[in-house]
Amino acid sequence: MKEGKILQILAVSGDPSLHLINATMLVVLIGTVIVHLLDLILLLISTSVNAWRTFNSKSYDLWYECTAKNGRYECKNAENADWLQAVQALMILATIFCLLSLIIFLWQLFTLNKGGRFFFTAIFQILSSLFVMSGAIIYTVIRPADPDDGHSFGFAFVLAWLAFPLTLISGLIYIILRKKE
């Protein structure tokens, strides 16, 4: 329904250059929201999935250590180390700040004055990127296993590292983005 209103607004305007500008802004806006949602999905998956490290039939994450035995997973709580709790807290903060920045962006989209910038949204998104970067660095540097013993990083760890630049880029886009009517 909102797309129909946007298209009606575009159709009422007689200047063809306005059609192009409005269509471009609509594409940028939709693209920004899609990137933001992708950031949030990456953060949710990397925070919750049991695949930060793998070794043979074992997998480790921020919360559990699981072993596959006879087609079943047996899981126990992860060690209670300070560094792991720091990574847990940073990943949770990154996810919360990313979600809050999406909510703030949607709120600012309807309340911000014409020409205003989305600085508040950008701050939350950039903080989210710094949190995920810090958590991934801590996990990289202080992991319990030596990489030479056969342990490898899992896909959730890779997703956390992918979420960092994507979230940072999204935050920078919000700094540049101005609200148009």
Image (spheres, rainbow, N blue to C red):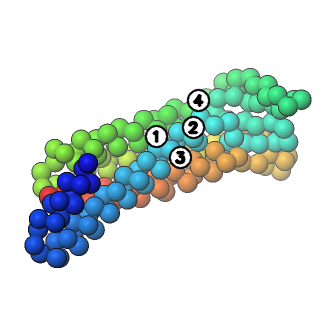
Residue type (three-letter) at the residue carrying disc 2: Thr
Task: Give me the residue at 55% from left, 54% from top.
Answer: 162
**Tag 3 residue:** 42
117 left or right of 138?
left
Amino acid beneath label 3 = Leu
CB atoms of marks 1 and 2 within 8 Å:
yes
Please name the amino acid that badge 4 sits on. Gln
Q: Measure the C-alpha gap from mark 1 to mark 2.
A: 9 Å
Graded by Cα atoms within 10 Å as few (under 14), some (14 to 19) or many (20 or more), the crowding at tag 4 reads some
In the figure, residue 63 lies in which quadrant? top right
Residue holding disc 1: 94
Q: CA distance from mark 2 to mark 4?
A: 12 Å
Cα separation, mark 3 vs mark 4, equals: 20 Å
Q: In percent of the image, x 84 and y 38: which residue is there? A: 57
Question: Which residue occupies 82% across, 42% down?
Answer: 55
Which residue is the site of mark 2? 47
**Residue 148, image x and y in percent?**
83, 50
Q: Earlier in the sequence, mark 2 or mark 3?
A: 3
Residue in view at x 47 percent, y 56 percent: 166
**Mark 2 or mark 4: whose residue is earlier in sequence:** 2
Q: Which mark is residue 153?
A: none
Select label 2 or label 3 by which is in front: 3
Q: Is residue 99 visible?
A: yes
Q: Secondary structure at mark 3?
A: helix
CA separation in Å, label 2 and label 3: 8 Å
Q: Are marks 2 and 4 in contact (CB under 8 Å)?
A: no
Give the residue pinned by disc 4. 85
Residue type pointed to by label 1: Ala
Disc with the residue nearer the chain's start (4 vs 1) = 4
